[in-house]
Structure formats: C-alpha cells, structure tokens
Image (tube, rainbow, N blue to C red):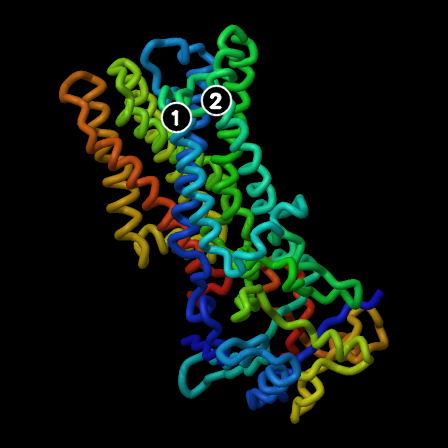
Amino acid sequence: MARYGMVIDTVRCVGCTDCVVACTTENDVPLGVHRDWVVFDTEGSFPTLHMQIRSERCNHCDDPPCVSACPTGASHIHEHGGIVLVDADKCTGCKACIAACPYDARFIHPDGYADKCTFCLPRVEQGLDPACVAVCPTLCMHFGDLDDPHSNVSTLLASRRAAPLMPEAGTKPRIYYLE
Amino acid sequence: MHELYSTRANPLIDPSLHVWGWEIAVYLFLGGLVAGIMIIGGYFMYRGRHTESICVCEQLPMLGLVLLSAGMIALFLDLEDKWHVWRFYLTFQIASPMSWGSWILLLVYPVLVLTLAIRPPRYLTQRFTALDRARNFLRGRSGLVRRIGMASMVLGAGLGIYTGILLSALGARPLWNSPLLGFIFLLSGLSSAAALVHLISRDPGESRMLARADNMFLTAESALILLFLIGLITTSRVHEEAAVLLLTGAFAPVFWVFVIALGIIIPLIIQSLAVAGKIRHVPASPVLVMAGGLALRFVIVAAGQASHWASTIH
C-alpha cells in the first residue's frame, strides 16, 4: 500500500500563496479558514538574515495523535495512501483532535466539524496531484509515495538534505522540506 | 532574532490555540468534585456510617447527580456540533481518553443512583416510592452496601484521574504532558469534596473529620503540584517554557494568587488552626478551597493551550 507524502523545496518557494488559493477553490474551503498556509520564517541578525518560505498543511503523520484522540472514530487513516481524514458525519466538534495536533493544522469548519487538508483525496484517487502541488508556479511542491524508492518524492529525499517540521513531537510527519 | 509570519489566521487557532474555554474548565472541576463526592460518600457507606442518625451521605449522592449533570451540560455546550453528541456512544475508541470518559460517565450515574438508594433523603422517598423500596431492600444487606460503597470509591478515583488524563494524553501541549496531572486533579477533586462536606455537614464531628482530611488532601496536592512543575522544568526546553507560563509568565498571577495562595495555602492555615482548636471553623476556608479548585482547572486549561512544541527561545 502506498504511503503518500510531500516534499517541498524551500529554496524554490517564493511565497506566492497560489497553493492556498488552489486549495480553497478545489475544496470549497469557507472564507476565513485555511487548510494550507504559507510561513515566512526569518532568522539571524541584520545584515546576515536567512529567510525560509514554507507552504504548510496537515502533515498526515504516520502516528497521528489527532486520530488516537478522537472519541468517535471520525478522525481516521484512509486506506488510500494512509491519508489522515475526518468523517464530518461522525464528528461532534469536541476539538480534542485540534488540541492533539502539534502543527495546529486543524480548525473548526463553520458547519461544526473538524476540518483539515485531505491531500485532495478525490484528485489523488484519479491519479492527479493535490491542487496545491498542481498549481505551484515554481514547481517547488512534489507529491508521491514515500515507500516507493523510484517515486519523485523518494528520489528528491535521497538526493537533497531535507527535514520534516518538529520531528521531536514524535508524530512521524510525512511532509519534508528541502533546505 | 527569529520572526515567524504565517498567512494561516484560523479562528481559535491563531495567534495561539484557545479551542477550549470555560466549558471544559467547569466540566473538569465538576467532574473532579463529583469524583471526590463519590470517594467520600462511598467510604462512608463502606464503613457503615449511613446508619448514623445524621450523615452527609444523605446529601452527597443527590449533589453528585446534580453537579455531574451540570458538568455534562457544560461539556455539551462546548461541542461544535451538538446534534452529533450521540456519536460518543456508538463506539469505544480505546486510545481516546475522551471516549473512556464518555463511558465512565455513563457508569457513574447508576452507581450514584445506587448510593442514593442506600440513604435517600426524605423529600425523595416521599415522591418516589421505588426509591423507598430500594432503601428497604438494601437496609439488611450490609455486604451489598459495602460493595456499592467500594464501587463508588473505585469509579470516583477513575473519574478523578480521567479528568487529568484527558489533558495529559494530548502530547502536543507540553504543559499537560505529565502523568501527575491525573493525580493532581483527583486530589483537587477530593479536597473540594471534603471542603463541601465540611461546609454542609450538620454533624460537627463529621465536619471536623473532613476538615482534617481536607488538610491532608491540600498538602498532598501541593506536593504533587511541586513535583509536576519540577518534572516540567527538568524535561526539555519546551516543557520548561510551559512551566514558566505558570511560574512567571502570563498565567502566573492567577496561578499564584488564586490557585496557590487563596486556594491552598490560606485555607490550609485557617483549617489547621481550626482543627488544632485555636480558632473557630469558618465557612470561608472551604469556599476558598472550592474556588481554588475551579481556578486550577481554568489556569491549566488556558495555559496548556498556550504551551507549544515550537520553542519561542532560539
């Protein structure tokens, strides 16, 4: 079975937020909430400043604390590529999953359920990339099977230095950032 | 310098998490208080105190039912999709403390009703003859009463610890990452329940006994809070930063003034002097203990959400 993940090249990313717009359009994300977002991370002291621009979203962790915190089974790991999803019909909006996520990747949808990135599952099931990956004008985002050594994500990870966000939180995130 | 600018701005998430408000704090306090009520009431019944002419075990089960229901209402108010509340009871998720809690709460109600039947108040037996019949059935069965008392104590301890585990199982919030939180909330619930009995008991001997017990609970709770903070400070940078939120940070005034000084130290001094016979028992001290218990839940719920794995110091 596939284990989907993303590799994002922070050197190429210019922070245009096209990924955010594409996600909102593709998934009918309501106004005022976001399934993905862009972070501008600046470190150092003038004039030797270093800025990393990252497109962030749910990390679809291998060991997702949101799933184990869910009291109703609404948060679950989908059989297709291990994508972490929420079944809105089962969700009570108790917010345990939101408190459990170290990435603060979830939010409450105006209809009262916990919502988040789905890796655009309907597109992925058709063999397409998630909308954010498909529209990226700098081609900095890559999606694929982390368990397939010949996939684009695996070859990128083998050839470049990469790190996930906050691996110390212990959730085994599946989005890697090329440095 | 380290500057982060994010385009996210999701409600309740940014700039810092605050998904749980007063409803959860009140629920955790009332859950802990009911846990204490079940342990104290269960102990009295286990020891046969329910046969005394005046015993607070006449009031405790009914108080437990009312307070637990109030806590459940607070929990219900917190749900974003209230029509889906029944979803809790269509499944049991073994890894989810909230799922455990949902089912524990369902077990608590029948046990509270059983303890109510052992020593029901007169205003209830006059209205509900079934309760009177249940009391008569249990009257001669001391072994069964002891078992119900034991069940009440065990379930009460489970409920009290669960209210802390609910938070400590959420690894994303460093302040809550301590197994001691369950025992702190259990002891806080016990001290609040002892304070309640101290306040409402019509038997002066019983009231004094619970004041003494409350002093022990408050002392043990203080020691656990100290260990909890030491544990956080000596774990990792993010845990240390979480402890600092309480010790000197944004939540320090509430923590030191309302939880530690007014909620533990001052009532402990007043009750110690009263137990030693140097001053009279005053209702202010048990009221302060209960208010301190509520403040503890508020500050832990709020500060826990403000704590984060992304260190703010670089």
Q: Quadrant of residue A165?
A: bottom right
- Residue at the outermost bottom position: A137
Locate the N terminus of chain A and report the quarter of the image it occupies. bottom right
* Residue at 59%, 80% in the rendered image: A55
* Residue at 58%, 56% in the rendered image: B84
Q: Which mark is residue B60?
A: 1
Q: How many marks?
A: 2
Between the residue at mark 1 and the residue at mark 2, the CA separation in whole angstroms equals 9 Å
Q: Secondary structure at mark 1?
A: helix
Q: Quadrant of residue A134?
A: bottom right
Local crowd size for mark 1, using a 10 Å CA cut-off: few (<14), some (14–19), many (≥20) = many
Q: Which mark is residue B115?
A: 2
- Establish if B298 lies above or below B123: below
Q: Secondary structure at mark 2?
A: helix
Labels 1 and 2: the sequence-earlier one: 1
Residue B168 visible in this rendered orientation of the protein:
yes
Q: Nearer the viewer, residue B14 or B55?
A: B55
* Residue at 30%, 41% in the rendered image: B292
Q: Nearer the viewer, residue A51 or B74?
A: B74
Q: Nearer the viewer, residue A59 or B146?
A: B146
- Residue at the outermost left position: B279
Amino acid at the residue labelled 2: Thr
Residue A38, position in %: x, y? 54, 81
The chain under label 1 reads B
* Residue at 25%, 30% in the rendered image: B268
- Establish if B214 lies above or below A23: above
Amino acid at the residue labelled 1: Leu
